[in-house]
Image (spheres, coloured by chain):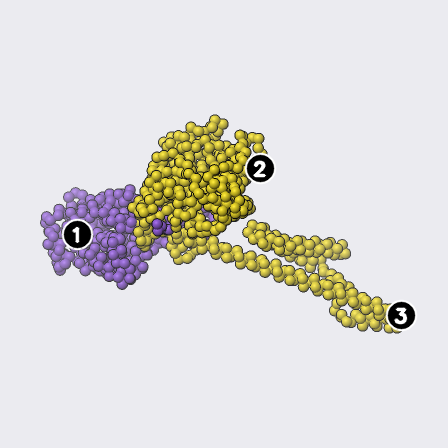
């Protein structure tokens, strides 16, 4: 309203490429070199693998193997359940020894159904069917293959890639390849780009084949010079025209999807929207490499590169790890000194979460295990009162007012927090990082978001209960009406029979009309016919509009139910059908009434 | 191993409340030293007295409020409040003036509102304003003339007696009635600019001799704070710009009104712009808000100095804008990433 624009502005980097500066953002010590000394190392086979059935955003996969069954590496062991879901595969050949609840890496110490496989040590693949090119395959087949491969976003959010790739193809013209990796310590993507750039481009090829982008922007922070060189050299000839490897200064959190889009293009993803709303698609480099393995080599997502680092690690580095590998084994191989460590963080120091122990499997989202010593990442001091210094606001990449959000969250003024764009907070932690009072700001936002979501869920549930109640009420009314109609019919039939009897008797008696009168007087206010009293045209019209309204309402509820309450779909469908029948009847009545007039 | 499960982020930058307060304090030091050099020991005596009083008062009230005493004392905020107040008081203010001012700042303006971070008004300026209203004589007649330290009447003995004894200020040469701003304002009504500048307070051919150096050193300290990211540039720049524009518009004739140079360098302007108005707790929060807030203070400083009755307007200007800060915050909320402000309610 004051005519100011956002803090960011376009600038040129050393190579003359344009980038937009994020408002806010921070630059914590990078600590990346430790884990980059060596090349990616393969994590050796271990005895047992634990494959959780929900490693992604969306519905749990359904197991399709039995305990005791022998499986081959890459064999499907759990099927995707529904649209937003991803299947799971055996990470190596062996025997399924259990399907049971196990604790999985999750901020709340959740347990999840897992399939436990005892490796037979042969690591024997199921038959594979590699593809040499994409041209000879139909788009639907490619998508199906991606869906079957269980590839999810490897950048952190673990969204099923097949779902992302089935989004509308007409409006997307830009592919953003996220090789930013802005969190300190993590170098999984860095080492991947450095060593497997060709695989990343093969993955880009797949996506490009589906979308035909106008431009493909490969985004890498300038603290990864060797990765930048590798990615530039590996650009395939046919993509040279459209691929641009863009670099920009290292700041946290430039790797956030929305932040990255702003840095590269100066454009913002609308609040609550997705990059595709502004014609962009964003994929992490690890995801693209996995996509290439899946499509060309028929290798489902069985492994990922995990950085193991921190001062308590003797051999920090990047480990090519099978999904399901117990973290304790990975820690053993990397030489974690458990006496020195006070935390094991999955992810980086800014957004990662501390694990309760290491008896947890590596999952698709395990990009890093950070095991710092107490002196390396000291615990924050006791939280002090907010001095409103505003440092948090200067640091916020989303231009929010972190301290106000914190006050609102504290005071449970959730509507105000929402009004101050709580849900635009990406929980990057930049505000908490700079806060001189050591206030755990992000915790407040998580709690407030949780509360709001819970309230919304409760509201939805109440709404569902109301729908159920109304449906039941409608059914009862309908049944009562049907009963009444039947009763009337029976009564009318009885009256007719009676009248016939009287008429027969009247051939003897002369007082027929009298008898008929008597028969009629039994139901003085009911017409003798079973048809309900004819309605006027206006009444019919009113009824019709009423019914149309009700059917529209029922239909919208049905659509809602289809999305999130499948158990109600049947009942609602019946309601809609019934209502439509009624409408037809009334319309017919109306037509008749109009004809008569 | 017993692992800790704390939430992210797991690393924090190297700031603390204490460091921020100490940095601000350190940034005032050059200006403070200049004050002592030009205007005598009174400033040092006052500062020590104020800080001691503040620490004792803070300890007592924190104890009463059942908070950890050491944590509160060590955050440096009470010390800084008292220090800033001491810099604003006349150097020869009697001891009880200083003590009353500090108590008002710490006890009333800060802790009765809930302690650090909760006070809607700048505590130092509350103390100052209270003193100015309650003890106008002591607050306006206890200023010193600028002169070399320990020469003339600027001995430690005189300062000490002025503060703790009952020295009649009017009998001592070293005292003056008021600050240069004040003197200029009242004398210009009868005299020409050249005549006004003959006054002792403007001696040695400089305007506001001594005050200029102090102000420039505050300015430098403030710029250091901006570069160290302790404060942002928005409030001071908006304040100084607005004040300058007002002075250029209405004081272009030095023969009728206090000129721009004196507005900027002759009073508490620089102290106010970089150290008082930037007090985060009581000011507007967003960058845009700070621009509005600073501009408001600059405007009010000029208005009160020129058309009001108080000699230096910084305290009242700051307090008035403290009132407005929540409103400014409401209307200057930055646009969040991806937010379409047209949808925002009420705007
Ligand atoms: S950084 Fe911390 S102390 Fe400063 S305003 Fe934000 S929450 Fe308050
Ligand atoms: S965690 Fe949220 S409020 Fe804090 S800096 Fe990040 S986006 Fe802003």
Question: Which residue is label 2 attached to?
Answer: A140
Residue in view at x 57 percent, y 36 percent: A141
Q: Position of residue A593 (x, y in %)?
A: 74, 56
Q: Is residue A406 above or below residue A39?
A: below
From the image, state whether disc 2 or disc 3 is nearer to you: 2
Q: Is residue A359 visible?
A: yes
The answer to whether the residue bearing label 1 lies less than 8 angstroms from the nearest atom of ligand 1 is: no
Question: Which residue is label 1 attached to?
Answer: B44
Query: Disc 2 and disc 3: Cα gap in Å?
Result: 82 Å
Q: Position of residue B85 (x, y in %)?
A: 23, 54
Relative to A482, B257 lies left or right = left
**Disc 2: CA contacts within 10 A as few (<14), some (14-19) or many (>=20):** few
Q: Are marks 2 and 3 in contact (CB under 8 Å)?
A: no
Between A192 and A487, the one lying in front of the other is A192
SS state under label 3: loop
- Label 1 marks a residue whose chain is B
Residue in view at x 13 percent, y 52 percent: B174
Residue in view at x 53 percent, y 30 percent: A132
Q: Position of residue A42 (x, y in %)?
A: 41, 36
- Label 3 marks a residue whose chain is A
- Label 2 marks a residue whose chain is A
Q: Is circle 2 on the same chain as circle 3?
A: yes
Chain A shade in the render: yellow
Q: Is residue B171 above or below residue A69?
A: below
Residue in view at x 41 percent, y 48 percent: A359
Query: Disc 1 and disc 3: Cα gap in Å?
Result: 134 Å
Chain that is coloured purple in the picture: B
Question: Which residue is label 3 attached to?
Answer: A507
Q: Residue most toward the right?
A: A508
């Amino acid at each position: 309203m004051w005519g100011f624009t956002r803090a960011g502005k376009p600038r040129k980097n050393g190579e003359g490429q344009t980038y937009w500066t994020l408002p806010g953002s921070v630059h914590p010590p990078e600590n990346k070199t430790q884990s980059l000394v060596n090349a990616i190392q393969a994590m050796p086979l271990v005895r047992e693998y634990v494959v959780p059935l929900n490693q992604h955003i969306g519905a749990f996969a359904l197991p399709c193997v039995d305990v005791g069954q022998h499986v081959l590496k890459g064999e499907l062991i759990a099927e995707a359940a529904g649209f937003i879901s991803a299947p799971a595969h055996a990470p190596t050949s062996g025997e399924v020894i259990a399907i049971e609840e196990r604790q999985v890496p999750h901020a709340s110490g959740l347990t999840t159904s897992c399939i436990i496989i005892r490796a037979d040590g042969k690591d024997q693949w199921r038959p594979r069917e590699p593809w040499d090119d994409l041209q000879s395959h139909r788009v639907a087949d490619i998508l199906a293959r991606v869906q079957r491969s269980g590839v999810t976003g490897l950048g952190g959010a673990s969204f099923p890639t097949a779902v992302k790739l089935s989004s509308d193809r007409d409006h997307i013209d830009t592919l953003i390849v996220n090789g930013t990796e802005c969190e300190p310590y993590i170098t999984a993507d860095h080492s991947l780009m450095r060593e497997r750039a060709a695989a990343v481009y093969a993955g880009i090829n797949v996506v490009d084949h589906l979308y035909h982008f106008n431009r493909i922007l490969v985004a890498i922070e300038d603290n990864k010079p060797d990765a930048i060189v590798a990615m530039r050299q590996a650009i395939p000839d046919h993509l040279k025209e459209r691929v641009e490897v863009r670099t920009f200064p290292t700041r946290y959190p430039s790797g956030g999807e929305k932040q990255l889009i702003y840095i590269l293009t100066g454009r913002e993803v609308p609040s609550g929207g997705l990059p595709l709303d502004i014609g962009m698609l964003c994929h992490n480099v690890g995801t693209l490499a996995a996509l290439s393995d899946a499509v060309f080599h028929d290798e489902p997502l069985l492994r990922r590169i995990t950085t193991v680092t921190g001062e308590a690690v003797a051999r920090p580095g990047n480990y090519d790890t099978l999904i399901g590998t117990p973290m304790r084994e990975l820690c053993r191989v990397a030489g974690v000194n458990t006496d020195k460590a006070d935390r094991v963080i999955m992810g980086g120091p800014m957004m990662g979460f501390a694990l309760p122990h290491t008896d947890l499997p590596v999952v698709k989202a395990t990009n890093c295990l950070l095991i710092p010593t107490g002196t390396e990442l000291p615990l924050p001091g006791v939280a002090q009162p907010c001095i409103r210094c505003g440092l948090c606001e200067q640091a916020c990449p989303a231009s929010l007012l972190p301290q106000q959000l914190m006050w609102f969250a504290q005071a449970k003024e959730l509507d105000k927090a929402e009004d101050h764009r709580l849900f635009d907070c990406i929980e990057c932690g930049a505000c908490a990082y700079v806060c001189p009072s050591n206030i755990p700001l992000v915790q407040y936002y998580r709690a407030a978001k949780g509360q709001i979501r819970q309230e919304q869920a409760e509201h939805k549930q109440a709404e569902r209960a109301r729908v159920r109640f109304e449906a039941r009420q409608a059914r009862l009314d309908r049944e009562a009406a049907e009963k009444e109609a039947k009763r009337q019919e029976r009564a009318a039939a009885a009256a007719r029979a009676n009248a016939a009897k009287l008429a027969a008797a009247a051939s003897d008696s002369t007082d027929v009309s009298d008898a008929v009168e008597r028969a009629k007087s039994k139901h003085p206010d009911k017409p003798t016919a079973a048809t309900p009293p004819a309605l006027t045209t206006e009444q019919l019209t009113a009824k019709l509009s009423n019914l149309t309204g009700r059917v529209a309402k029922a239909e919208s509820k049905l659509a809602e139910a289809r999305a999130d309450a499948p158990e109600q779909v049947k009942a609602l469908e019946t309601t809609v059908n019934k209502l439509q029948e009624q409408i037809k009847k009334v319309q017919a009545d109306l037509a008749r009434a109009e004809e008569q007039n | 191993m017993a692992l800790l499960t704390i939430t992210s982020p797991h690393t924090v930058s190297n700031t603390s409340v204490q460091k921020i307060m100490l940095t601000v304090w350190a940034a005032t030091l050059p200006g403070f030293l200049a004050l002592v050099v030009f205007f005598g020991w009174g400033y040092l005596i006052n500062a020590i007295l104020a800080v001691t009083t503040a620490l004792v008062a803070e300890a007592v009230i924190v104890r009463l409020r059942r908070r950890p005493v050491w944590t509160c004392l060590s955050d440096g905020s009470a010390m800084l409040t008292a220090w800033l107040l001491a810099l604003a008081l006349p150097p020869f203010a009697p001891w009880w003036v200083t003590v009353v001012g500090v108590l008002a700042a710490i006890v009333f303006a800060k802790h009765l509102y809930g302690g650090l971070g909760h006070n809607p008004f700048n505590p130092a300026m509350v103390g100052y304003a209270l003193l100015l209203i309650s003890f106008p004589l002591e607050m306006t007649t206890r200023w010193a003339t600028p002169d070399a330290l320990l020469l003339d009447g600027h001995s430690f003995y005189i300062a000490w007696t002025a503060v703790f004894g009952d020295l009649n200020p009017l009998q001592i040469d070293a005292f003056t009635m008021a600050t240069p701003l004040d003197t200029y304002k009242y004398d210009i009504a009868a005299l020409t600019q050249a005549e006004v500048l003959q006054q002792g307070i403007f001696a040695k051919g400089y305007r506001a001799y001594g005050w200029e150096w102090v102000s420039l050193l505050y300015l430098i300290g403030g710029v250091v704070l901006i570069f160290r990211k302790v404060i942002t540039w928005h409030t001071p720049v908006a304040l100084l710009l607005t004040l300058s524009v007002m002075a250029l518009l209405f004081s272009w004739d030095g023969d009728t009104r206090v000129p721009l140079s004196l507005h900027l360098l002759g009073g508490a302007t620089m102290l106010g712009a970089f150290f008082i108005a930037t007090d985060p707790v009581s000011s507007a929060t967003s960058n845009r808000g700070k621009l509005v807030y600073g501009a408001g203070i600059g405007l009010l400083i000029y208005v009160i100095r020129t058309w009001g009755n108080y000699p230096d307007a910084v305290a009242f200007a700051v307090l008035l804008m403290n009132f407005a800060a929540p409103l400014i915050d409401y209307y200057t909320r930055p646009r969040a990433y991806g937010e379409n402000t047209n949808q925002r309610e009420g705007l």
